[in-house]
Amino acid sequence: MDTEAMQHQIRHRLQYLTDRAEITDLMDRYLRSLDEGRFDEAWARAFHTEDVTAEMPIGTVRGRDALLAHVRRGMALFDRTVHLGGNAVIEIDGDRATARGAQLSTHVLADGSGEVFISAGHADNELVRTADGWRIAAASLRIAWTRGTPPRLPAGLGAGAEA
């Protein structure tokens, strides 16, 4: 292998590793942000594309503004949460990527009962590279199992809800 080909291979590998680290960081920061509870426009822009699509247990939404409103309503059902993600398989193809991982979420209900609700499932994400870095363009959370008392969902939230 000549020097130019080797340098190209090294640059390509370095870009792959850098992209993988940035995507992993984005996904970790996203889960952490759910527990911090600051859902504003800056939060939505930091993680999602403007035309994001998200399929969640509390419904499906399209667009960053709709996602922001939906997450605010959904997370208001809980006093405290801890979201953990792991086992991510990340595939990168130029300026597009997919990330699939496991997610375990523990929630303390906000209804005053102190009840704990736990859910576990798989998160599938499609990401795109933007001028501001990697962003989630599509997300899907499929719950595999739950334990405990689920929250009472207000009108507009739930599997049949779509915005």
Image (cartoon, helix red, strand yellow):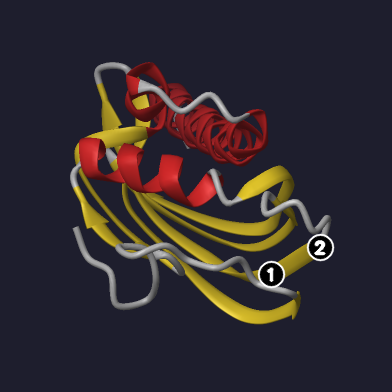
Residue with the mark numbered 2: 115
Q: Residue furthest bottom?
A: 145
Nearer the observer, 110 or 101:
110
Q: Is residue 31 above or below residue 156?
A: above
Is residue 8 visible from the viewing direction of this image? Answer: yes
Q: Quadrant of residue 5?
A: top left
Name the residue located 42 percent from the left edge and 62 percent from the top edge: 154
Local crowd size for mark 1, using a 10 Å CA cut-off: few (<14), some (14–19), many (≥20): some
82 left or right of 155 in image: right
* Amino acid type, residue under disc 1 in the picture: Ser
Q: Quadrant of residue 11?
A: top left
Percent position (x, y) of residue 89? 58, 60
147 left or right of 12 in image: right
Is residue 136 visible from the viewing direction of this image? Answer: no
Name the residue located 39 percent from the left edge and 22 percent from the top edge: 40
Percent position (x, y) of residue 159? 37, 76
Percent position (x, y) of residue 50? 19, 34
Q: Quadrant of residue 24?
A: top right
* Amino acid type, residue under disc 2 in the picture: Glu
Quick one: SS at disc 2? loop
Nearer the observer, 39 or 18:
39
Q: Is residue 45 above or below residue 98?
A: above
Residue with the mark numbered 1: 119
